[in-house]
Image (tube, grey):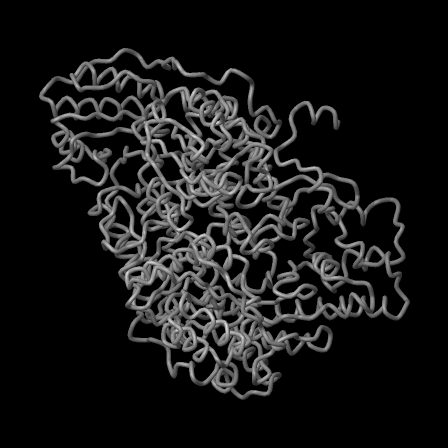
């Protein structure tokens, strides 16, 4: 290792690595790697010439700091869904920058995730109350893709074959329109931009999207349009602004079926476009079609209220190609921030912010009219748009004064502008308003007007009149002391990497170093508007160029796009790129996608979204792709074969030796190879997908490249492609790109741009040689655990040399037969030992998949192995008849503090065994917040918002 940082990132020391190697029968790491990675794909050395040499934290931070200073921070009043906001310092310090929040995993083990589940329930409640719709999810990726999900839901529930038209408000945000176009075409949906007030709606229309306020800032009463759409059998989606909605009547009360939008302006920095929590709410009828995750209330084994992810059977990992969406992640960390922002301000505080913005906008309108700018009479919230001959002069004056205004038409150069737009926000004040009026006066050669005192304007459309957000949580924590304590109470109910390893197979829960996270909060990265002029975003462009080049070199591809803002979006984008290439060659008929039966559920869901038809390929008894079945299916569909989606190393945790031949078979039959990069942590610096036959690969930066999971999001899923596919990488309507580019798959050109510095820092500090070392140690740690645990829980799949890759699947199915213990019993019992469970019952039911990563020390690996071995001893007691088969530590797990300290103890094992099964736990115990949760009860009795004041009173 040549990187000073590598010893901080890689958990086992060199001496510990040697002990692990000796336990496995190897003398050094190189001998071990040669036995694990197939010789025909193993690179003799990492791409040292393509990456800078590794360095220490201080040096990398200094370089990135210098780079960040090439961004130009001007006050951006561009709007279009992105606004300045004031993140309360308490939320920034104790949530956004707190590893207890950002290193947790998706709350699938709900008993040790009650904190973030409660924060997400608060978010859902906020959105439901804002929109007046009863079902709201726990966030989506961005507003544009949320609108596309609404279109897909509307299309999916429509039962009229002739209904293929989706009508879109001409005033929709430009990035939303572009993403809708990308999403609609493969599904055979006909998109039309319309004036909602005049467009006829008939039986050929399945859905309508309205934007309130529109891109021009105008507000209007949509009731008549909604009624007309319903009369024609169409669903209506309204894209809303959350602050404007605090003043307007909830769109649900006006008849909307779906509401979408972005919670960015609720305390989340612009960050050059993301990550931000989008939201999606709908009527009760579509609770089983709503995309993304849904937090619901249930009860635990002790009869207490408990939270969990509800209705999971509707999600892609269950429904696969029948799923309504491929969304497998969310923007949890950002949704949590937005929820605490609402708790911090409460409904009166949110309305006060909105009223102040509207009042300032009213004064701005008054000044524009005094100055003679043409401005139509209309209801508006925060935005004015003006078309005038003096627009270029306005933009010149704005630039001198330090402002970015919206250039009209969108995408035009300021010198060619025919208009301008100004969107005020939470940071606007009287001083800023005077500066704006001064530059507007200068542009038209007049004196700055004197305005009347600020006052909240009246709106002619329906206004919010009923009490809202009355739940106690939005009123109890206004002082900083109380809010701080509330945040910390929620932290105490979660298990994260702060507490110990999270051994989730396929999810790569590795170190998220503080030095990697630190730059995300720098204003130079956090405060930039995604549509600011390109010359003001030079640091982002350089950072993106570096990342694209480094990732391309590490994966063996010719080009990389950083736009997809989740792994599922990377899959989707990659398949669209393949589809576009086939079409460019006159082979639009190629529509068959081969997918192994072991694939991630997102794979078939993404294929269907991309307009492809899924054909399953069998796996053999060793978990490898059945190459005979693959060859037969590829030949059978040769005339229509578009792609094969393959995960490598395989979903079963092994390096398949035939990967080159697998790729060759697909290529010989006219298809392309899409490689799912979920398991890239086993390959970086050792082998390159682009070199052994893959044409496209998505890279989970939130797995392999250290962006933290954030409790279930954000993620980043860029794609690498071979040279022939590079011209088709995603474009963006407000950024120049190749004419052959597919449409955007995310709202912003760089997707979740503000967290890209994390991966930049990781790669810069590690360098190529340390990255190879990290991958090697990840493989070593997995094989060490497989070696230690095989006698207790047989390892189900191994490679040709008897080794696993970076993860191993432990077979628990015999325990169900012999002791009545199933995989969930072991998962819950692990909580008592202080661990999050591995991945449960996937890809094989009744198994767990363990991935330790390279960042866990040998002591932590042994602690985890010791826990599982001890649990196996508890199971042997059941098998031997010395432990009750129904009333034992596994069946009653997890054990809460309340249960262990209760006066009554009706269990035939000791409190000590229940709560402190491992030596030393008394000094460092992580208690499950609730007992085992009744999942079925929560689905049968769905409650996905906070209880009302009345419900709390009744319960009391």
Relative vertical location of residue 338 with respect to residue 687 in this rendering, above or below:
above
| Residue located at (24% from left, 29% from top) | 421
Q: Is residue 85 shown to the viewer in this render?
A: yes
Tell me residue 181's x, y (percent): 35, 44
Tell me residue 408's x, y (percent): 21, 33
Q: Is residue 774 shown to the viewer in this render?
A: no
Toward which corner of the image does residue 546 lie, by quadrant?
Answer: bottom left
> Is 672 or 518 nearer to us in this picture?
672
> Is 533 or 465 nearer to us in this picture?
465
| The N terminus lies in quadrant | bottom left
| Residue located at (88% from left, 49% from top) | 905
The answer to whether 153 appears left or right of 532 in the picture is: right
Toward which corner of the image does residue 815 lie, by quadrant?
Answer: bottom right
| Residue located at (60% from left, 78% from top) | 798
Relative vertical location of residue 188 with respect to residue 673 in this rendering, above or below:
above
The answer to whether 411 appears left or right of 530 in the picture is: left
Relative vertical location of residue 201 with respect to residue 324 in this rendering, above or below:
above
Toward which corner of the image does residue 272 lie, by quadrant?
Answer: top left
| Residue located at (68% from left, 23% from top) | 950
> Is 38 or 119 nearer to us in this picture?
38
Relative vertical location of residue 764 with respect to residue 622 in this rendering, above or below:
above
Tell me residue 587's x, y (percent): 33, 63
Tell me residue 596's x, y (percent): 53, 68
């Amino acid at each position: 290792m040549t990187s000073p940082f590598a010893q901080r990132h890689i958990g086992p020391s060199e001496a510990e690595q040697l002990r692990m190697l000796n336990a496995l029968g190897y003398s050094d790491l190189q001998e071990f790697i040669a036995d694990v990675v197939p010789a025909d794909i193993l690179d003799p050395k990492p791409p040292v010439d393509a990456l800078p040499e590794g360095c220490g934290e201080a040096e990398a931070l200094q370089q990135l700091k210098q780079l960040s200073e090439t961004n130009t921070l001007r006050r951006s009043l561009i709007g279009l869904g992105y606004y300045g906001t004031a993140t309360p310092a308490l939320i920034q310090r104790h949530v956004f920058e707190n590893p207890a929040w950002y290193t947790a995993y998706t709350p699938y083990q709900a008993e040790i995730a009650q904190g973030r589940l409660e924060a997400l329930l608060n978010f859902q409640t906020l959105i439901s109350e804002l929109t007046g719709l009863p079902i709201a999810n726990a966030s989506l990726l961005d507003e544009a893709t949320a609108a596309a999900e609404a279109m897909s839901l509307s299309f999916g529930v429509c039962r009229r074959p002739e209904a293929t038209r989706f009508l879109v408000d001409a005033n929709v945000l430009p990035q939303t329109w572009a993403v809708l176009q990308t999403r609609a075409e493969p599904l055979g949906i006909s998109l039309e931009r319309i004036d909602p007030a005049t467009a006829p709606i008939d039986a050929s229309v399945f859905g309508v999207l309205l934007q309130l306020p529109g891109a021009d800032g105008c507000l209007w009463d949509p009731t008549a349009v909604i009624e007309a759409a319903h009369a024609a059998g169409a669903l209506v989606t309204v894209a809303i602004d959350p602050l404007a909605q605090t003043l307007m009547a909830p769109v649900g009360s006006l008849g909307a079926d779906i509401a979408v939008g972005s919670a960015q302006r609720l305390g989340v920095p612009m960050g050059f476009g993301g990550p931000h929590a989008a939201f999606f709410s709908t009527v009760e009828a579509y609770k089983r079609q709503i995309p993304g995750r849904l937090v619901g209330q249930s009860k635990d084994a002790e009869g207490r209220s408990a939270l969990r992810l509800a209705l999971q059977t509707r999600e892609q990992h269950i429904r696969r190609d029948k799923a309504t969406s491929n969304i497998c992640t969310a923007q949890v960390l950002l949704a949590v921030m937005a929820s605490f922002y609402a708790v911090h301000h409460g409904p009166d505080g949110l309305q006060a912010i909105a009223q102040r913005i509207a009042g300032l906008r009213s004064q701005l309108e008054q000044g524009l009219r005094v100055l003679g700018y043409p401005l139509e009479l209309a209801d508006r919230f925060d935005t004015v748009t003006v078309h005038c001959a003096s627009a270029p002069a306005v933009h010149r004056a704005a630039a001198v004064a330090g402002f970015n205004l919206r250039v009209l038409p969108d995408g035009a150069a300021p010198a060619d502008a025919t208009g301008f737009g100004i969107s005020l926000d939470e940071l606007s004040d009287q001083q800023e308003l005077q500066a704006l009026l001064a530059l507007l006066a200068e542009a038209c050669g007049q004196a700055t007007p004197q305005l009347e005192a600020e006052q909240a304007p009246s709106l002619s459309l329906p206004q919010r009149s009923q009490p809202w957000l009355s739940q106690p949580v939005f009123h109890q924590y206004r002082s900083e002391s109380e809010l701080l304590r509330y945040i910390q109470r929620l932290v105490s109910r979660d298990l994260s990497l702060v507490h110990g390893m999270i051994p989730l197979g396929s999810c790569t829960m590795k170190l998220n170093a503080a030095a990697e996270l630190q730059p995300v909060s720098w204003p130079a990265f956090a405060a930039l508007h995604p549509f600011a002029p390109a010359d003001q975003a030079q640091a982002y462009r350089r950072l993106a160029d570096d990342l694209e080049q480094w990732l391309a070199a590490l994966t063996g591809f010719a080009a990389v796009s950083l736009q997809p803002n989740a792994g599922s979006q990377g899959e989707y984008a990659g398949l669209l790129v393949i589809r576009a290439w086939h079409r460019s060659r006159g082979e639009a008929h190629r529509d068959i996608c081969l997918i192994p039966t072991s694939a991630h559920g997102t794979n078939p869901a993404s294929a269907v979204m991309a307009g492809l038809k899924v054909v399953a390929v069998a796996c053999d008894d060793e978990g490898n792709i059945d190459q005979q079945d693959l060859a037969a299916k590829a030949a059978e569909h040769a005339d229509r074969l578009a792609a094969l989606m393959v995960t490598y190393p395989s979903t079963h945790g092994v390096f398949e030796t035939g990967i080159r031949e697998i790729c060759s078979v697909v290529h010989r039959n006219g298809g392309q190879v899409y490689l799912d990069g979920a398991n890239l942590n086993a390959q970086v610096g050792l082998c390159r997908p682009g070199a052994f036959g893959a044409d496209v690969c998505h890279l989970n930066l939130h797995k392999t490249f250290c962006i933290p999971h954030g409790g279930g999001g954000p993620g980043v899923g860029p794609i690498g492609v071979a040279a022939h596919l590079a011209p088709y990488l995603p474009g963006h309507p407000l950024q120049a790109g190749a004419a052959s580019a597919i449409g955007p798959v995310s709202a912003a050109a760089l997707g979740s741009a503000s967290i890209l510095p994390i991966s930049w820092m990781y790669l810069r500090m590690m360098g190529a040689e340390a990255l190879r070392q990290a991958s090697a140690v990840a493989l070593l740690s997995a094989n060490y655990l497989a070696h230690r645990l095989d006698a207790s829980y047989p390892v189900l799949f191994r490679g040709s040399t008897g080794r696993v890759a970076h993860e191993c699947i432990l077979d628990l199915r015999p325990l169900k037969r012999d002791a009545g213990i199933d995989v969930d019993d072991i998962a819950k019992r692990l909580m008592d030992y202080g661990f999050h469970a591995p991945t449960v019952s996937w890809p094989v039911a009744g198994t767990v998949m363990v991935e330790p990563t390279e960042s866990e020390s040998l002591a932590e690996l042994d602690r985890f192995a010791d826990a599982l071995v001890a649990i196996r001893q508890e199971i042997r007691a059941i098998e031997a008849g010395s432990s009750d088969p129904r009333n034992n530590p596994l069946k009653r797990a997890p054990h809460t503090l309340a249960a262990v300290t209760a006066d009554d103890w009706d269990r035939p094992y000791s409190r000590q065994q229940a709560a402190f099964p491992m030596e030393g736990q008394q000094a460092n115990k992580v208690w499950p917040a609730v007992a085992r949760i009744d999942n079925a009860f929560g689905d049968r009795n769905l409650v996905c918002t906070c209880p009302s004041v009345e419900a709390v009173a009744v319960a009391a």
